Amino acid sequence: MRRIKPFAVFDHGAMSTPHLIASMRTACSAALHFGPQLSGAVLLRLGYLCLALFTAVGKAVHQSGDPRLVLAQLQLVERFSQQLHRDQLAGALDAQASGAHALSLESYAALRLPEDDPHAITDGLFAGPPPVVQGRSCYKNAEELLAAWLGIAYFEAQRRIADAHLLIGRRTPDGSICAPRFTELAKLYDQGTASRRAIASAARRLKKLEPQDTTFEGTATELVAHGDDGRTLDEFAAQTLKDLGPRAAQKKINSAIKTYKQTHGKQLPPKLGFFPGPVVNGVHFFSLRTNATDAQLIQSVCSQSGNPRTEAGRADRQASQEQPEGAGEDIEQNDEAEVGTQQDSSSASQEPGPVPEWLRSEQPMPPWAAEASEDDADEPDGEEHPPNTEAHDDPAAEPDQPLRRLNAFMALLRAPYTGGKRKVIIPKCVVYLWHADLQNLADAHGMSSNGVEIPPGELRQMLARANIIPVVLGGNSQVLDMGRRMRYHQGPIREAILARDRGCIVPDCTAPPDQVEMDHYLKAWSDGGETSVYSGAGMCTKDHHKRHAGQLKVLDVDGLPHVLLPEHQDPEQIPRRNTYWDARQAGESPARTNSATCDSCNGTAPTGAPRAHFPGSDDDNEDPLASDGA
């Protein structure tokens, strides 16, 4: 076979930049065009040339200091990283399949070339067939060879080969390579459209659900792990990774794996209980294991006490029980309080009075003062203080979030024998479920307002108890019979929005539901917007500010708020909703029976017709800084 000689060195000083780039493109594509006609020395020299060029480009970008060039280079580096991940697995599989661990010691010594001298590579290194040692080889298997040859841990080498079997190919008894174990994940991995590290991680988790692979022994092995919809978990994971963001996809895959383990008895739940732990430097450790129902009550206490901006959170700044009577009086005590009724408190006299009408400005707040104002956003909790109250405590002297939670928990324990001077936090449990789920409680799952998944057995028990607030979702994910009132989204309106959105609606946002603010996304309150379930959207503080700054848009699609991300994040410009907290998507609910109206649609949109309304359009021209922030 004719061998192509190594490429000549170009005199780039005598060449123009376009000619130089064209020559480099020719060199890069030579490996594919000439294929086996290239000698091993030429292939390796091309590889070293690419490495040197990539290193030089990185140094030049670093010296430029141009943030635009830095971002473009980072995108290129990420593409390199994606390709390197695949080449690591494919190379490990090739080393195993070709029997590289059985080469002679002389071959290993000859191949160990100086890293700074690629010209030492000659065609003589690859002349003739590979010299295989007779008898005992230096390395037992490919894993040992890769660990020693590459200077990596043995288990890392083992993981690469195992991942290659899952996503690249598997060895057969005759030494050939057959299809990988997870064919759907392998297709997505080969395309490179999703994170290859995330795909490999999902494949490793699915592998634990499957029987031992016996392909190398000559026995075919089929996948046995299927989801509730009949698809293999391999297909489910591939579709999830393709459609969702990395965090939302990981959560859904973990949930599917957990459900499969519970259904097939592959995972026994740990023992419930309250376990005293060790004492370290006078600090006592305790371990608490609960079911989902009790966990939601604890999460409710944590979310209320952990927020320093609410009355509940401010009441737990001190561990002492000697607080003025009436502190935290407006903590919700019953269903009437949850409807939005504000209780009178003796501590109200200590708060500043309402601002006189003549002091209220009709002009928008200036940009420099917008971020410093807390009245421009709903409180992350449902029990917020009135708009004209403030917290006067020194933030630096306040306990951190875990200590406030501990204070609230200890207040609950001390309440029976302290005379009830201090108003303790009342845990609250709100469960979201479909109306159709009430007719099939045997399989129905619920989701609490704090993101705790309620299994069917516990859900049936909760519905039979008192003080459980059912929020039933109906057509097109809208909440039934909640009503609307007040300037701020409080009480039942806030709970209704959270029942629909579950958390921040921005895709792949993981902010806890109890820290979500409510945004008047259809029309600002200052522009005559209404405060209702349909006008509000759940957003975390960061994304709430981004929306008002115009960095992302929120639009109405079939009555559900959707997010339009910036073009550089979503080139397709498709309205999306977050799926991390299992927020209901358009079309997932039962058939709609109500028509939807919108001022921008000049009437009523027909039932079932997709409708998108941009709140930032000409008919809804609001100034974000003039808004109440909700």
Image: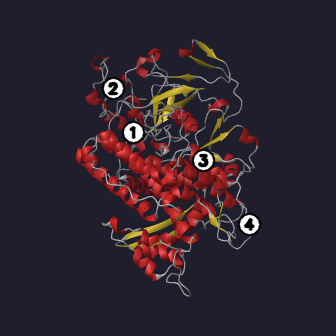
Q: Classify mark 1: helix, strand or loop.
A: helix
Q: Quadrant of the C terminus?
A: top left
Residues at marks 3 and 4, CA–CA distance in whole angstroms: 27 Å
In 3D space, how far apart are the residues under numbered discs 2 and 3 (Cα atoms)?
Answer: 51 Å
* Crowd band around label 4 with a 10 angstrom C-alpha radius: few (<14), some (14–19), many (20+): few
Q: CA distance from mark 2 to mark 1?
A: 29 Å
Q: Amino acid at mark 1?
A: Lys
* Residue 226 percent across, percent down from the top left: 71, 55
* Mark 3 or mark 4: whose residue is earlier in sequence: 4
Residue 315: in sight, yes or no?
no
Q: Amino acid at mark 4?
A: Ala
Do callouts 2 and 4 mark residues in contact (Cβ within 8 Å)?
Answer: no
Give the residue at mark 1. Answer: 542
Task: State the SS at label 4.
Answer: loop
Q: Earlier in the sequence, mark 4 or mark 1?
A: 4
Q: Earlier in the sequence, mark 2 or mark 4?
A: 4
Q: Which mark is residue 240?
A: 3
Residue under the point 51% across and 49% down: 247
How many other residues sit within 10 Å of disc 3, few (<14), some (14-19) or many (≥20)? some
Closer to us: mark 4 or mark 1?
Answer: 4
Q: Amino acid at mark 2?
A: Pro
Residue at the outermost front position: 2
Q: Nearer the viewer, mark 2 or mark 3?
A: 3
Provide residue 446's location: percent of width, then percent of height.
64, 46
Where 258 falls versus 592 (above or below)?
A: below
- Answer yes or no: do the residues labelled 4 and 1 have beta carbons within 8 Å? no
The residue labelled by disc 2 is 354
Residue situated furthest top in the rendering = 602
Mark 3 and mark 4 in contact? Answer it, CB < 8 Å.
Answer: no
Q: Residue at x 65, y 55 (%)?
A: 183
